[in-house]
Amino acid sequence: MTNSLPYSLAGKRVWICGHKGMVGSAIVRRLEKESDVDILTTDHSEVDLVNQGAVETWLSQNKPDAIFLAAAKVGGIHANNTYPADFIYLNTMIAANVIHAAYKNKVEKLLFLGSSCIYPKMAPQPIREDALMTGPLEPTNQWYAIAKISGIMMAQAYRSQYGCDFISAMPTNLYGPNDNYHLENSHVIPAIIQKVHKAKVNNDPTIEIWGTGKVYREFMHADDCADGLVFLMKNYSQPEHINLGAGREVTILGLTKTIMKIIGYEGKIVHDLSRPDGPPKKMMDNSQLSALGWAPNYKLESGLRHAYQWFLENEINLRAS
């Protein structure tokens, strides 16, 4: 049955599913600050999350008390458009396998990590949780969105039928350490950081950004996201998913200029208008989480400086990968 609140992590075995990713690694860093938490991690060689039998075997042998389900195949607009089958199949299977095995092995609590792309393309702003499935999705990432919606519904279904304390959180656009810096398949912040850095090193007179740059986006540092997720694990137990937002938005053009300032690049911006903008505006309504008493720590510029410093420290490894 569902647990009473607050849910204590002290003395618990906690599996961070997807610990090598940006969010998963941030959750590990955050949980290392907790007292008496046994952090469990696995890589693909230990358990293939797309293989139902492998997932069930690992869970039955290791018996975690709580799970942060942060594993996913992720990418930006280009990646979603290019690999739709991968995005819907892999993400649906990961959610289904882990959630079902968690139920079978009597896991006390599970937090499923969704994505703001689950909401309709033209959802009223800021986007409230009840906007889910009220209109058409953004076509460029609908495959990923459908898989994430399926995960939310699974968590709700296992709670309804079996009393499992499974919850879902929807973070806004994230950035930070261990982000994907592939120029074609990455999200916007790592793509712009890498472009601007390269332009500065090469003394290029211009950098190119996709689309008009006029669309608005909200961004949250991964460490803030991890802190919010741990807060929700302890303090939230409802069937409805809950937004995890930063409460601030910026245009892509404004974002680019801020990154240029941080890196010290003074060239000009040119626009590739053959590339899609995506939704014109996307900001999460963070009022439910704020009412519970949580707020993010990073301002955008300080978070971007932290992200750029990580990029500089890991640039050699990123080039080799």
Image (spheres, grey):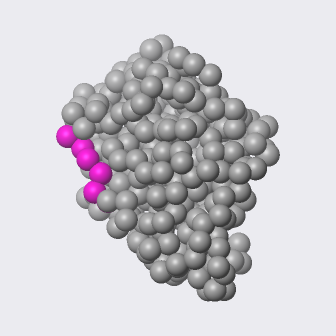
Image quadrant in which you'd find residue 283: top left
The residue positioned 48% from the left and 51% from the top of the image is 251
| Magenta span contains residue 294 | yes
Q: Is residue 66 above or below residue 237?
A: below
Q: Is residue 222 above or below residue 314?
A: above
Q: Is residue 18 left or right of residue 226?
A: right
The residue positioned 54% from the left and 27% from the top of the image is 122
Give the x, y percent position of residue 136.
Answer: 62, 22
Tally of numbered tags: 0
Give the x, y percent position of residue 47.
Answer: 65, 50
| Magenta span contains residue 151 | no
The residue positioned 66% from the left and 58% from the top of the image is 271
Give the x, y percent position of residue 256.
Answer: 52, 63
Task: Please say whether residue 290 is visible from this viewpoint.
Answer: yes
**Image: magenta residue range:** 293-298
Q: Nearer the viewer, residue 109 or 319?
A: 319
Secondary structure mostly seen in magenta is: loop
Q: Is residue 295 above or below residue 127?
A: below
Task: Please say whether residue 64 is visible from this viewpoint.
Answer: no
The residue positioned 48% from the left and 59% from the top of the image is 255
Image quadrant in which you'd find residue 27: bottom left
Which quarter of the rendering shows the C terminus?
bottom right
Q: Is residue 85 left or right of residue 149?
A: right
Which quarter of the rendering shows the N terminus?
top left
